[in-house]
């Protein structure tokens, strides 16, 4: 099922519960809500087209990662730790390690607090040597968490990076590309369709509209009766 998420940025009205969650979450951060949400949408679309995944699945992974404060500063950066974590969770799932959303939670915990949660990545097939673990934890304890995060993400990328894209079928990718094209066209003509709908509803509710609609229905009924009569006549001829 395809669901493309759109928001009315002037009023924060969104067509998706996931985006509504993001709007509410980001309002409590030192971020420009509209700009960040738009960027997250753009990245979700990019991943969707590249991997053949529905963008709903990608945004669901992003939602899971939003709860980890250490990734907040990377939300507005294309290709930053937040995006890398999103893709890593998806690549791990494509490699047979858990579900993408579950991976995102475990990965988010490890990135947020490597000292306590690094070992949790073992269940995802991500292991570190004693020296690597010690270095990562030392960086985190030395207020260099971003370097620790880079080491963790680089290790995952080295093992499973790109697997989701490589394992996607051409049909899956093409489907998402067509979905994106359809959304672009739909968004362009949506204002006109909304206006037509309003005018149609007003016409149906008006006395003249009700009278016209009654005449249209009666016309269809008459046509149906005439067709039924013709069918009966043909049946008689064929006897």
Image (cartoon, grey):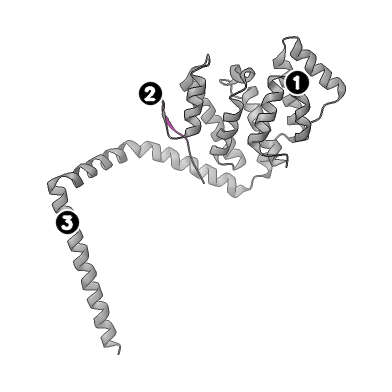
Residue at image x 83%, y 18%?
Answer: 134
Residue at image x 71%, y 15%?
Answer: 145
Tell me the residue that label 2 is attached to: 10
- Contact (Cβ within 8 Å) of mark 3 with mark 2: no
Q: Separation of disc 3 and disc 2 at Cα?
A: 41 Å
Of tags 2 and 1, the one toward the viewer is 1
Tell me the residue that label 3 is attached to: 214
Q: Is residue 138 above or below residue 21?
A: above
Mark 2 or mark 1: whose residue is earlier in sequence: 2
Count of marks placed on residues: 3
Residue at image x 58%, y 35%?
Answer: 58
Q: Separation of disc 2 and disc 1 at Cα?
A: 41 Å
Provide the secondary structure element on which disc 3 rests: helix
In the image shown, does 218 or 120 lie closer to the viewer?
120
Q: Residues within 10 Å of mark 1 (few under 14, many from 20)?
A: few
- Contact (Cβ within 8 Å) of mark 1 with mark 3: no
Residue 112, given in percent of the width and then of the height, sits at 68, 20
Q: Is residue 147 above or below residue 155?
A: above
| Numbered range of the magenta stretch | 5-9
Q: Residue furthest front?
A: 116
Residue 196, given in percent of the width and then of the height, sits at 26, 42
User: Which corner quadrant holds the C terminus?
Assistant: bottom left
Residue at image x 19%, y 58%?
Answer: 216
Residue 209, given in percent of the width and then of the height, sits at 16, 48
Provide the secondary structure element on which disc 2 rests: loop
In the image shown, does 119 or 38 lie closer to the viewer?
119
Tell me the residue that label 1 is attached to: 116
Q: Separation of disc 1 and disc 3 at Cα?
A: 72 Å
Secondary structure mostly taken by the magenta-highlighted segment of the chain:
loop
């Amino acid at each position: 099922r395809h669901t493309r998420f759109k928001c009315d940025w002037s009023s924060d009205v969104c067509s998706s519960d996931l985006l509504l969650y993001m709007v509410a979450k980001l309002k409590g951060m030192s971020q420009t809500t509209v700009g960040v949400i738009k960027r997250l949408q753009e990245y979700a679309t990019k991943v969707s087209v590249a991997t053949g995944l529905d963008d709903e699945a990608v945004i669901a992974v992003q939602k899971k990662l939003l709860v980890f404060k250490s990734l907040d500063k990377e939300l507005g950066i294309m290709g930053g730790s937040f995006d890398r974590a999103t893709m890593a969770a998806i690549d791990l799932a494509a490699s047979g390690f858990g579900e993408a959303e579950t991976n995102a939670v475990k990965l988010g915990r490890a990135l947020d607090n490597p000292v306590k949660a690094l070992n949790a990545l073992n269940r995802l097939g991500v292991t570190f040597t004693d020296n690597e673990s010690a270095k990562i934890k030392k960086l985190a304890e030395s207020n260099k968490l971003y370097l620790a995060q880079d080491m963790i993400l680089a290790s995952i990328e080295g093992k499973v990076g790109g697997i989701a894209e490589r394992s996607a079928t051409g049909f899956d990718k093409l489907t998402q590309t067509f979905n994106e094209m359809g959304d672009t066209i739909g968004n362009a003509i949506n204002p006109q369709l909304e206006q037509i709908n309003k005018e149609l509803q007003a016409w149906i509710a008006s006395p003249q509209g009700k009278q016209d609609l009654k005449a249209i229905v009666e016309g269809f009924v008459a046509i149906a009766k005439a067709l039924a009569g013709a069918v009966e006549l043909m049946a008689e001829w064929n006897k």
